[in-house]
Amino acid sequence: MALPAWAPVALIVQKYGGTSVGSLERMRNVAERALATQRAGNEVVLVVSAMSGETNRLLALAHQITDVPDRRELDALAATGEQVSAALVSMTIQKLGGQARSFLGHQIRVHTDDAFTKARILSIEGSRLLETVKSGKIAVVAGFQGVDAGGNITTLGRGGSDTTGVAVAAAIGADVCEIYTDVDGVYTTDPNICPSATKIDRISFEEMLELASLGAKVLQIRSVEVGMKYNVPIHVRSSFNDRPGTMVAGEEEGFEAVTVAGVAYDKNEAKVQLVAVPDKPGVVAALFSSLAKDNVSVDMIIQSPSRGTDRSTDVTFTVPKTDLPRARALIETQAKGIGVERIEYDADIVKVSIVGLGMRSHAGVAAKMFSLLAAENINIQAISTSEIRISCIINSKYTELAVRALHDGFGLAKNGAEGPASIPPPVG
């Protein structure tokens, strides 16, 4: 996805999410916006998601057949949602007097690896898209999908159309990738549970990368990774108004980083505790290697002495809740082989996090976070940190209370917000 020197100057990639193309009426709005952008003198590439709810409907059909569907067939099924959107949006543009052509992932050669349902983009051949826009047409790309070396259809995981949009922008040298969604930008936290949340104008790639990994769902984490790697500015905007949104870009010189920039939460976490694991070299490595081979991501990991008297430890870690059904079989097979006493599962948890570039140079942030949670009688089950992030696992019933306490406790309330922030996660 190297940036070609011959990329056009006024080249814009617009990505529209499921709610933005959720009906024929909304598709007309997308078509009108794309045509207005083109008539203003720009060359336009659209990337579209499946219609709102369509991917869930398709996956539900698969799970009616089997509890654990074959992942290759899941990808072949799920990719059809974006194919429908791309064709309908292209037809709508044509109906409104414009010229458009739709493309599927394999037609513009979105090359991916073969990790079905979670494929990663390896390269994109952008020449066909550039030829299309230079001929006066709007190119409409089906997001979320690609093709592996064996010619199999692959999908990029939840929110994968964001990654398609930013990767396409990088491949064709676009000036900006506009991500249109049902919110009007990046907020200090989820305004649905914290009324004092504030929309901000600009956030750094680094902060957004942390927030996207922590449950903030307006942007998929890999889209931010691609934007940061290829320096593609990402403009998060509402598809239902023309107001500026939030620009995700590199740090500006002279930018003074705030200590805590925003709060995120993630309910898609499940906790696994292995009790009385033999304390021998290679035991834990074998467990996590088996999970990695099956593309199960492990987040927080805590190892502590067992309550027993023998040489054993308790190992606690978290995995995505959606991966728990298939991870369970692997965990239990490994646990039996190494002699674990018992396994405890807890899906009734949430990960709450604070993020800010200024945390690099400010002491006492962790202590303040823990104190704010303790003041609300919220028990912390696990902790993980990075240079600009602190995350805690708590019981899910305290989600709203914890988010509000941290948000307002760190001075992010309206009229007091100091800068970049988090993206509202989904409610529920």
Image (spheres, grey):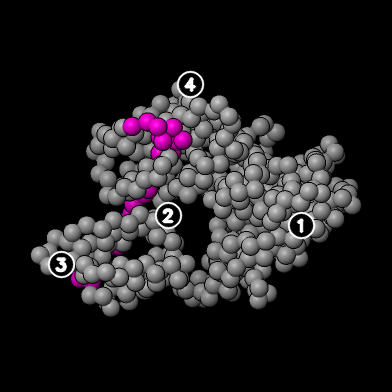
Question: Could one spot residue 363 in this view of the protein?
Answer: yes
Nearer to us of marks 1 and 2 is 1
Measured as percent of width and height from the top left, residue 210 is found at: 48, 45
| Secondary-structure class at tag 1 | loop
Cβ–Cβ below 8 Å for labels 4 and 1? no
Residue to which mark 1 is pinned? 126
Amino acid at the residue labelled 3? Arg
Report the Cα–Cα distance between label 4 and label 2: 31 Å
Label 4: few (<14), some (14–19) or many (≥20) C-alpha neighbours in 10 Å: few
Residue drawn at point x = 67 percent, y = 61 percent: 123
Q: Residues within 10 Å of mark 2 (few under 14, many from 20)?
A: some
Q: Are marks 3 and 1 in contact (CB under 8 Å)?
A: no
Question: Mark 4 or 2 closer to N-term?
Answer: 2
Type of amino acid at the residue the image marks with label 4: Asn
Task: Specify which label sits upstream in the sequence, 1 or 2.
Answer: 1
Task: Find residue 415 and name its label.
Answer: 4
Residue for badge 3 = 311
Single out the mark in the foreground, 3 or 2: 3
Give the answer, above or below, for where 233 lies relative to 295: above
Q: Decide which of tag 4 and tag 3 comes sooner along the chain.
A: 3
Distance from disc 3 to disc 1, alpha carbons, whole Å, reads 58 Å
- Of labels 3 and 2, earlier in sequence is 2
Q: Residue furthest left?
A: 309
